[in-house]
Every structure is written in C-alpha cells, then in structure tokens.
Image: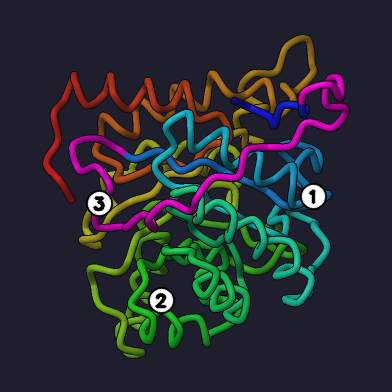
Amino acid sequence: MDSLAAAPGTGPATSPLPVLRKPRPAARFEDLPTDRTLVMGIVNVTPDSFSDGGQHATADSAIAAGLRMFYAGADIIDVGGESTRPGAEDVSPEEEQRRVVPVIDALVKAGALVSIDTIHASTAAAALKAGAAIINDVAGLTMEPEMAELAASSRAPYILTHRRGDARTMNSLAEYKDVAAEVVAELAGVRDKLYAAGVSPEQIIIDPGLGFAKNDAQNWELLQNLDQLDSLGHKVLVGASRKRFLGTLLTVAGKTAAPQERDDATAAITAISAYRGAWAVRVHDVGPSLDAVKVAARMAPRTSQ
C-alpha cells in the first residue's frame, strides 16, 4: 500500500501519506560485489550542477533521486553539495553540510551505501557521522590537507582524485607533455602524503579526475591509457559521466550535445572501463551503466580487486 486509506465514511484521503519504513541495516563497503565493476550513482544537492541544472537542489528531491538510483541497482550513491564544474562558486562547509547531511541520513536508513563528494574535511566528518561510508575527496588534498588525517582516523575508504587548482583556475592548468604519466606521478606524490598521515594502501581508490584541469584531448588520452593507473596498485574509479568532452564529441550541426544527451556515450565508456578492469564508474544514469558492467563482466570475467 502506497498511502494510508481514509477512515470508513470519510471519503477519499485528500493528502496521501507515505508509508513509513523501518531503517534497514547499514550497508557495508566490505559487502560490495567483487565479480564486476561497481556503479556509483551521482546525487548533486546543488542549484548549479552542470549535469542536471539544479534538479535535485532540495533535500526531498535529492533523496528521491538517490532512492531511484538505489532501487535501480546502484552499488553506491555519491552525494555532493558543491558544484565542481569550472567556474563554480565556492560553498561554505556549513551550507554544504546543510544540503547533504539530511540526504545522506535518509539514504543510509533506506539501506544505501553512501559516499560524500566534498573538498572539506569538516563536511566529510559530518557525512561519516550521518552514516556515509566513503570519502570522495574531489580536490585530492589540494584544498584541505586535514582530509588525510580524517581518512587515517576514520579508516574509511578514500577516493583520491587528480586535480590541479580549483574551480576558477583548473582550466588554465591543463598543460601536460604526457598526461597519463604526469597524472600517475602526481597521484603518487599525494598518496605519499596519505601514507605519511597513516592512511593504509587498501583504503585508497584512485580517480584520474577526468575534466579536472584536463582538456578534451587530454581526457581521451587519459582514458586510452587507464592501464597506467594500475601501476599505483589501487582500485580505479572512472568518472566520465556527462562531461564536456563527451558533449564535444557528440556535436551535431555545430551544437554541442547537452549534458542529458550524453548518457549513451557515458554508458559506452562504462563498458570499456569495466572491460579494462575499473573498480567502479561514477554516473548520472544508473540503468544503462549497470547493464554495461554486466556485459563487460560476462565478456571478460575479472578477479576481485
């Protein structure tokens, strides 16, 4: 039953009430599937997201979006409260936490495994307290070194993203002689800081940071050389979903494809990344990518990472 029925003789209920569900046991990172690439669904609790134009800027709409992804089969729900697109305005940790904590709390109670997408250590700490299981540091320690201390003390899985600069400067820093080799070297340097803070190797997940201080050609070159990331010895997360370089590729009659028109291309990258052994992909449209990782697993059975 989706709503509470009206009492006999009172006529139909005018304001259906949702059924209250008991909280489910918290999902655990250790229980994630190991026989295929994982699918991480993206929930942006922001008014200025490049991908959905602020469609999930309120807690209620963000929770609903996260639940749809969870029930569609997403392995992880990644919740963020600050846009990372080039040129985005900064958001204070206090405002970011106001946006994301209620969403994380609700999704965790529904049984979802949640990661927090943030550059702020205080927001990551608040998210862990609310039940999030994974820290997704989209600044890769370039903003707040305190994040390393939090990762060490919490023992939470930590996604280390490659990035240069911030939202205002990253585009100007997209200069590489060999993008794959330089990304690997820079990630290794940041990883050493994590080790020095007490973070263990098994906690670390590597994200090459597609679109962060990388132009279209560099993104493609990095995707073509994902195997070089394996030299770091960590799980690899690929986040290409709806990014600008896909829109450029799909340009028709001089018009770049809109973010929502890039999901098929995203699913293609998911299939390729999964076939090549990526631990997870981060996407806006869960269903096609979940199908893609299952096909890739059937084509090339992979060992657990």
Query: Tag 3: residue type?
Result: Asp
Q: Position of residue 169 (x, y in %)?
A: 73, 65
> Is label 2 in a helix, a strand or a loop?
helix
Looking at the picture, does residue 276 appear above or below residue 28? above
Q: Who's the residue at 20% across and 43% down the image?
A: 34
Name the image quarter holding the N terminus. Answer: top right
- The residue nearer to you, when weighing 89 against 93, is 93
Label annotation for residue 58: 1
Dividing the picture into quadrants, the one containing residue 56 is: top right
Compute the Cα span from label 2 to label 1: 34 Å
Q: Who's the residue at 73% across and 11% down the image?
A: 252
Dividing the picture into quadrants, the one containing residue 250 is: top right
Q: Mark 2 = which residue?
A: 190
The residue positioned farthest toward the front in the image shown = 9
Q: Position of residue 275 (x, y in %)?
A: 26, 29
Density class for disc 2 (Cα within 10 Å; few <14, some 14-19, many ≥20) is some
Q: Mark 3 = which residue?
A: 31
The residue segment tinted magenta is 8-37
Looking at the picture, does residue 46 appear above or below residue 196? above
